[in-house]
Image (spheres, grey):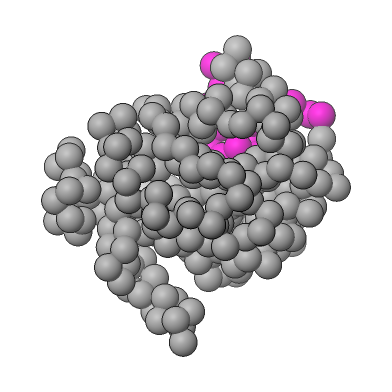
Amino acid sequence: MRLAVILPAAGLGTRMLKGSVPASAESTGTSRKQFMLLESSPVLVHTVRKFVSSPLVHEIVVAVREEDIEWVRELLTPETKSLLGELKVVAGGASRQQSVEHALAALDPDTDYVAVHDAVRPFIELETIRKVVEEAQSTGAAIVGIVPVDTVKQVSGAQAGGPKVRSTISRERLILAQTPQVFRVDLLRRAFESATADSFTGTDESSLVERLDQVEVSVVMGSERNIKITKPADMDLARLFFEQEAR
């Protein structure tokens, strides 16, 4: 079983504050969360280290902005010396979906399964990676998710005075999707081809596979530690988690 990991990292991270990344990592005037420093290393580096540590991973493909390819390759190459296969850094697209599609095209032809993981989720646990990969091997498609702890409300659209509550949704059948999301590579490619043909844009890779209606996507329970760093306050929690892991 040959597993490749795709890390889409071409986003601008507009919710982050300017000035939080080193000058070498900043070319657009907008702070990018994947390059923010967490204990002296960019968040992306911490994420790559997790997958390099997994004995299941043969190849890692990172999709970044075209102007970042060379320095990101130099940044990540020392981190991947123990990788079974190859590290590739490719040009991403204007959206996450386009970035993943570009990375798919760069995969080794012998790849059997592909895991897509948010570049800004550096606290994924090796055991969770193992479980979701094994589930995908059994079913063809599996994602990581957690059960919401807050009450979920369905509301009306924007209106004067703000949205209004229309109903309360039972949490028993709800999952907050995380990553990695793992699929048979042929299945994910068909999903992208179908999405392109229909001009469909999904919020994650699972949404593209779901609309094929060929397999049921399984869910493996994740962890609340598997946070997605998207705003400045998340870095405070990330530093705490990093200290705990270091201990």
The answer to whether residue 84 is left or right of residue 221 is left
Residue 129 painted magenta: no
Residue at the extreme bottom: 247
Q: Nearer the viewer, residue 147 or 245?
A: 245
The answer to whether residue 241 is left or right of residue 197 is left
Range of magenta residues: 198-214
| Residue 236 % position (x, y) | 32, 73
- Relative to 29, is 22 above or below? below
| Residue 95: quadrant of the picture | top left
Question: Does any portion of residue 81 appear in the rendered image?
Answer: yes
The answer to whether residue 131 is left or right of residue 48 is right
The answer to whether residue 91 is left or right of residue 114 is left
- Work out which quarter of the rendered image holds the N terminus and state it: top right
- Relative to 8, is 167 above or below? below
Residue at 80%, 40% (x, y): give it. 140
Residue at 42%, 37% (x, y): give it. 89
Residue at the extreme front: 81
| Residue 136 % position (x, y) | 77, 47
| Residue 117 % position (x, y) | 54, 48
Q: Nearer the viewer, residue 15 or 58?
A: 58
- Relative to 245, is 211 above or below? above
